């Protein structure tokens, strides 16, 4: 599906009303609700950001099913990341930050016209990088960069396997890997193969091919790293495809999205396998990647690392090593449509929401 047209306006400058999308419980996308309230004032160390772009990630797809590992209780405002302009700042914040475009990883709360953040959680977006471009690279870029460069650390000339190479994280990951001089095998449905070839990726059709067998044909000695967001049986196959000294980075359980039962159990099973595999004397390594790892233990270190890594991703964008793949751009009031589109599996790249003042709301008013 091609890029959708932007409906409404690209911001709400001059409007003092905060508009946000509420996820009230386990609902279909059309069950999302709109809520209006006054824009709050920032507290000490905080900023108010007028959101210019926020994204639809796999996390929201899991959250609406109550399947995300540590989501908050309903109701809440979803939205994993955002990009916007700082409108006001509280005491203790450098006054020069007002008027700057910033990005932030928030986990929830991003689907809104205005968001209050701790200033320390904002990362400046370089001049010349647009809000929508930057938005495609916040959670996706951080995840891809840290998995590739902080976990796998594959040497130039190595070969990696990326599951879901056409997805939000996958698209960024394969580009960063190619820029690092790596050979990339990527799984995707056949409709995305030409686009992957254009990125220098060897595509594998996960629907029509035996993926492990095909990967062994392409890399008889095994691959140096596998990046697996699928979980379930796939993570076991991924481990077995590693070359000696290889690294498995598991970062999700997408195959269990529509399952019932405990939302923690699929992750706990992966964690158990990771622990067991790392205890084996075979020279291979396994990780379950969580972008929030270390935040509870050392918030300042976490923030510094996130800022440094996201800055690296933005610089890669400026150098042309990474491009912003936008699947669709839709106004905040059409969040239901955006979520439905993201869940369809028919798009490549990221579905981006842009706050607007249009009246064509696809979400029901909050009670």
Image (cartoon, helix red, strand yellow):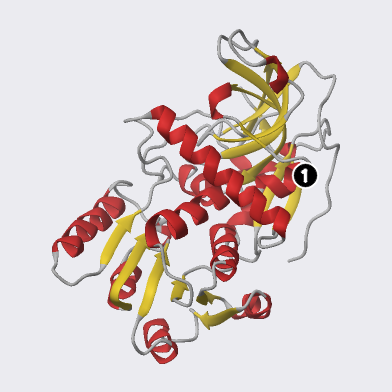
Q: Quadrant of residue 201?
A: bottom right
Work out whether residue 196 or residue 220 is closer to the camera in this orientation and state it.
220
| 311 relative to 153, above or below | above
Q: Is residue 172 visible?
A: yes
Residue wearing tag 1: 130
In this view, 7 is above or below 109: below
Q: Residues within 10 Å of mark 1 (few under 14, many from 20)?
A: some
Seen in the image, is 266 located left or right of residue 207? left
Q: Position of residue 342 (x, y in %)?
A: 62, 55
Residue 72 screen position, x and y as percent:
42, 31
Q: Along the line of sight, which residue is nearer the eye, 32 or 188?
A: 188
The answer to which image quadrant residue 122 occupies is: top right
- Determine whether the residue tagged by mark 1 lies in a helix, strand or loop: loop
Q: Residue placed at 84% from the left, 34% from the top?
A: 358
Location of the C terminus by quadrant is top right
Say which of 137 and 22 sits in front. Answer: 137
Q: Residue at x 42, y 68 (%)?
A: 154
Residue name at image x 28 percent, y 71 percent: 236
């Amino acid at each position: 599906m091609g890029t959708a047209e932007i409906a409404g306006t690209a911001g709400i400058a001059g409007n003092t009303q905060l508009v946000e999308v509420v996820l009230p419980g386990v609902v279909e996308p059309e069950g999302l609700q709109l809520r209006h309230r006054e824009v709050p004032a920032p507290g000490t160390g905080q900023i108010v950001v007028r959101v210019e772009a926020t994204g639809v990630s796999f996390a929201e797809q899991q959250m609406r099913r109550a399947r995300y590992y540590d989501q908050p209780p309903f109701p809440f405002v979803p939205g994993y990341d955002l990009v916007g302009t700082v409108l006001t700042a509280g005491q203790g914040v450098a006054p020069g930050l007002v008027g700057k475009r910033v990005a932030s990883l928030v986990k929830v709360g991003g689907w809104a016209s205005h968001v209050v953040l701790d200033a320390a959680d904002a990362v400046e977006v370089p001049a010349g990088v647009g809000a929508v471009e930057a938005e495609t690279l916040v959670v996706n870029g951080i995840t891809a960069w840290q998995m590739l460069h902080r976990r796998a650390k594959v040497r130039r000339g190595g070969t990696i396997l990326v599951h879901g190479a056409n997805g939000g994280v996958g698209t960024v990951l394969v580009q960063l890997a190619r820029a690092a001089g790596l050979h990339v095998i990527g799984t995707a449905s056949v409709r995305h193969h030409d686009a992957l070839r254009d990125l220098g990726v060897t595509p594998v059709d996960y629907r029509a091919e035996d993926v492990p067998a095909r990967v062994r044909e392409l890399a008889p000695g095994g691959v140096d790293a596998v990046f697996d967001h699928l979980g379930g049986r796939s993570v076991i196959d991924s481990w077995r495809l590693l070359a000696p000294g290889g690294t498995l980075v598991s970062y999700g359980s997408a195959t269990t999205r529509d399952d019932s039962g405990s939302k923690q159990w699929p992750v706990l099973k992966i964690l158990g396998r990771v622990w067991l595999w790392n205890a084996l004397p075979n020279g291979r390594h396994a990780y379950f990647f969580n972008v929030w790892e270390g935040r509870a233990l050392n918030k300042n270190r976490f923030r510094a690392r996130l800022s440094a890594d996201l800055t690296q991703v933005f610089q890669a964008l400026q150098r042309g090593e990474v491009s912003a793949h936008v699947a669709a751009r839709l106004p905040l009031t059409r969040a239901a449509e955006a979520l439905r589109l993201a869940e369809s599996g028919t798009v490549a790249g990221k579905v981006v929401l842009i706050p607007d003042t249009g009246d064509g709301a696809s979400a029901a008013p909050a009670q």
